[in-house]
Every structure is written in structure tokens, then in C-alpha cells.
Image: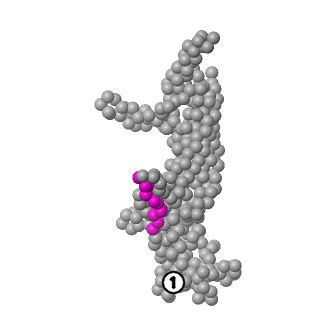
Amino acid sequence: MKHRGKGIGCMWYPIGFTVAANPSAATVKVNEDGTATLLTGTVETGQGSLTVLAQIAAEELGISTDDVHVVSADTDTTPMDTGAIASRTTYVTGNAIQLAAEKAKEILFEIAAPMLDVIPNQLEAADRKIRVKYYPQRSLSIADVALQAQFVQGRPPIGSASYNPPTVGMDPETGQGKPFSTYVYATQVAEVEVDDETGEIDVIYMSAAHDCGTAINPMLVEGQIQGGISMGIGFAMQEEMLFNDEGVQLNPNLTNYIIPTSLDMPDIDVDIVENFDPTGPFGAKGVGEPTAVPTAAAILNAVHDAVGVRITSLPATAEKVLKAIKENRDGGQKALPAAE
């Protein structure tokens, strides 16, 4: 017989390294045609980071994301980046890029100000133009200003910057400190169906609410949450490394190390909780690893709700679940006569 149950899992997760320095650096150059070149040492591993970082640079410069050419992950030409780890890229590298783009923009403003008969702090960048605040009709194209800066004023609009999250070391006596600059939060709810004759679990629905600060690219955030849930399902129910007595792995390839496929994925509702973080680039924090953290807890809580057993070791295979169900039944039958 199949039983349905619901479970919830909550988490908080720090962004970046624990106290240790984890800086990123970036260089932004505005070209004479109004486009920009972004140099960053970060790595694109399929999570869409280069798109988000280009969006950050474009927003700061007032141009389109399509106008930003990203050069990344080439240690011969790009500045230092600690790495695409610890869910830090949007927050740390994004901050470095925003600061670098701001420095390049300041040069553009200093060049454009006398051309528009204003002072630099009366200018803004938007729609590929440098324009007077509250008087957008008075404007110059960024391309024209960059050309003036480069070939007339001799001040190429280039900005370089680095960012390292501010932290405070932990006091060994009081335990007080600030090991991380910011945190993200999430809650996931799972609905499962458990067969009490086989122990098989079927995840039929997941709902995920994630606070990642400002979602720079909501579609990429949603995709990462869906991918994290897929990883969480594998962690909860399928993925297991088996070794023999000599320590040799028995399932070292994907023919017998089982991971979820599209057929294992439930219906998923994603709720992006917008929560502006003043320390992040345009309020952003991050979403990477936290997407997989609460999934297993939510699924196993749902299993308990469905059949009344707690699985405390992962993965929760059908064999483990069935054994726990049988032990629970046997225990209940033995206790019944004593209760009478």
C-alpha cells in the first residue's frame, strides 16, 4: 500500500570562506564604440555566472548586457579570483566588478561633465548614454564620451578593483566574531509517496522558497534551485559510494553509481524571496550550494510523515526504508499484548 506524506526542511548558509580571505578582482574597460570589456578570473561551470557578472557590469555602466564582452578564467590575462566555490561568485566577484565598472564610469563622467556644462555628480549613465540627472534630454552617447576620453583627453576609461568580504575572527574564549559577511536562507517542502511493501520512495512534489538577496537573473536562479533539488534527491535517495574490504570503490562509474534523471524529478514550485542586501552588488547575495541543502531533510521528514519511520543514514534506499517499516511493525506487535 502506498502512503503519502509531507515534510519540511529549512536552512541558512554562509556566503564565502570562513573568516579566511577570499578576494576577487576585476578590470572593466569602456571601448570607443560604447561597448565594454570585462576581465575576471572566475570560472563558468554551467551556473550562468558570466551572464550575471556581465549584467552587473552593464547595469553599473548604463549599457546592455550584450555590449559587455567577458574574458574569464585565463590566468595570463585576467586578474585574480579565489574561485567558483563557497557560493561566492555573484556576491564577491560581483562586488569587485561593480566597483571596477564604477571607476571606469567616474572617468566617463569627468570627461562628459564639461561637455554638458555640469559637474560629474550631476550625471548618470543609462540607455547607453551619459545624461544629466532629471534632464535626460541633455546627454551624450557613451561611445562619444569614451572616444573623447581616449583620443582627446588621453584618459582611457578603465577601472580595476578588488573585493574581499569583511569578516572578524572568532574569539576562542567567547566564540564571538563575524565569520561571514552575509547569509542566505531557504525552506523546501516535499510531498512523497512511500510503498510500505517495497520501501520505494517517489517524490511527487517539491516547493522551494529561497532568499538570495536581489535575483540578478531570476531565470538562472530558478534553474539553479531546480538543479539543486535534483542533487538533493540523489543525495537523499540514490547516490551511495560502495567499497570492498580493501577500500576499492565498487561503483566508480555512472552505470552503477545512480544519480537522478529527468524521470526522477517531481513537479517543482520555486519562490524567489527578494531581500535586498546592502553589502551585495545591487543587493544580491547568492544561490548556488544552498539549493541542495534542505532537500534531503524535507524528503526524509515526508517519509516519516507517510510511514512513521526515521531514516538517519543516507541514501534512504528502498531496502533501508522497508527494513525500518518492518522493524516498526514488529515493535508495535510486540508492544500490543503488554498494553492490553
Task: Read off the residue under disc 1.
Answer: 149
Q: Quadrant of the N terminus?
A: top right
- Residue 51: give x, y in percent of width and height: 54, 60
Of residues 285 and 28, which is closer to you in this image?
285
Q: Quadrant of residue 191?
A: top right
Q: Quadrant of the C terminus?
A: top right
| Position of 166 relative to 236 (above/below) | below
Write the residue at 63% across / 24% down: 2
Q: Quadrant of residue 10?
A: top right
Assess whether residue 180 is covered by the magenta stretch: no
Assess whether residue 165 is covered by the magenta stretch: yes
| Position of 302 relative to 130 (above/below) | above
- Residue 276: give x, y in percent of width and height: 61, 60
- Residue 147: give x, y in percent of width and height: 52, 82
Of residues 221 and 175, which is closer to you in this image?
175
Chain part drawn in magenta: 162-172
Write the residue at 61% across / 14% down: 339
View extreme (front): residue: 173
Q: Amino acid at mark 1?
A: Ala
Write the residue at 50% across / 31% down: 312
- Position of 127 compared to 46: left or right? right
Q: Residues within 10 Å of mark 1 (few under 14, many from 20)?
A: many
Residue 85 seen in the figure? no
- Residue 150: give x, y in percent of width and height: 49, 83
Q: Quadrant of residue 203?
A: top right
| Position of 331 relative to 255 (above/below) | above
SS assignment at label 1: helix
